[in-house]
Amino acid sequence: MERRHRPILQLLLALLLVVGAAPIAPAFAQDADIVDTAIAAGDFNTLVTAVQMAGLVEALKGEGPFTVFAPTDEAFAKLPPDVLQAALNDPEGLLTQVLLYHVVPGKVMSSDLSDGLEVATLQGESVKFTLGDGVAMVNDANIIAADIEASNGVIHVIDSVILPPSVVAAAAEGMAEAAATPTPMEESMEEMADIVDTAIAAGSFNTLVAAVQAAGLVDALRGPGPFTVFAPTDDAFAKLPAGTLDALLADPTGDLTQILLYHVVPGKVMAADLSDGLEATTLQGGTVVFKLADGAAMVNDANIIATDIETSNGVIHVIDSVILPPAAEGEPAAEATPTPAEEPPMLLPVTGGDAGSGVGIALTAGLILLAIAGFALAVRRRPV
């Protein structure tokens, strides 16, 4: 009995092996329509949301067949945020036009494509295919997966959102009109605060404003310009040696004016215009040198801590130290006259040269050494 059943068992086992080895067709994929297939894939969340907002779900669940070029979430992420938001804000207009441009009536498989083929979309305008070197594109988007069949059509996955030519043209026209039309900023440029009023309003440049007023430079810095001002903060002025600022304010038309003018460059120099090693001539006549490294910018030895504060007559860059003009060649820096009730203030350090006191001491010491040497030589030559 056992021997009689053995061939039957062997036949059943062979049949099971054959059935088990046969590929299982993904019937569920073809049973699902285009919308449900996209939802199940998990890579088209933005597309599905957009289709829902545009009210196109029922249409894409229709009998079809349709061919959908489906941008991934990463493809939508390539769009500038304001562009995507503008489309989502106009679901029945711009968004619908863009989505329908991704749908072709009929079932177009990858084998049906040819280089240069143009096909009309449901939006009304055509897409163009490019085939070469094993790569397929629709307009400027790469087709990165093809022939995902659904119950009512086929999906091809693309890596960029494609836009109808009419939408691109309208956007370009809008940009041109925007460029030609003065912006509210440009229209109100005359009403924008000038350099002086901007500094006053900021509240961080009280010392600088007081110095400009004392030096009689207010009207000059309210002029048409344009000017570029490297503005030391109140903390920057506080770094100066004690008594220095008071001494400068006591002689506003002398060293104070020279120092202030050394912080102003004629013309409008934006941060993007700077380069490492660039030199610029100031209104004082001396030059400043810019250093750019490791994401930091400096003018002379001062750090530029804020840039491109635009005003009606120029631009302000904020610096964390007062910069000082180099002394005239061969001329020691002028000493500030001390007030009777104070000790003589420390001299301001001079960028690009020695301090006046250092030059004076060195010169005096040299003269003394020269006199001693001459005396010694005269003694040695005197006959005994």
Image: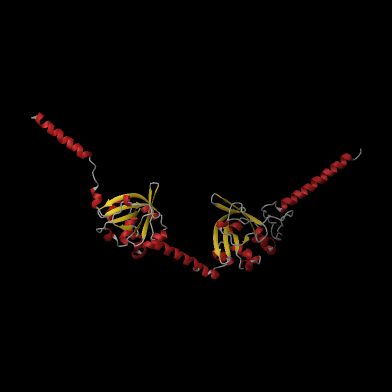
Quadrant holding the N terminus: top left
* Horizontal relation, residue 81 to residue 272: left or right: left
Residue closest to the eye, 215 or 285: 285
As drawn, the residue found furthest toward the left would be: 1
Can residue 324 be seen in the rendering of this structure?
A: no
Residue drawn at (73%, 51%), measured in percent from left and top?
359
State the count of labels: 0
Point out residue 327 in the picture as x, y percentages from the top left corner: 70, 55
Point out residue 239 in the picture as x, y percentages from the top left corner: 61, 55
* Horizontal relation, residue 169 to residue 35: left or right: right
Residue closest to the eye, 101 or 305: 101
Point out residue 157 in the picture as x, y percentages from the top left corner: 34, 52
As drawn, the residue found furthest toward the top would be: 3
* Horizontal relation, residue 326 to residue 104: left or right: right
Point out residue 361 in the picture as x, y percentages from the top left corner: 74, 50
Quadrant holding the C terminus: top right
Residue closest to the eye, 248 or 223: 223
The color scheme shown is secondary structure
Residue drawn at (80%, 47%), measured in percent from left and top?
368
Residue drawn at (34%, 55%), measured in percent from left and top?
69
Residue closest to the eye, 189 or 19: 19
Can residue 311 be seen in the rendering of this structure?
A: yes
* Horizontal relation, residue 33 to residue 320: left or right: left
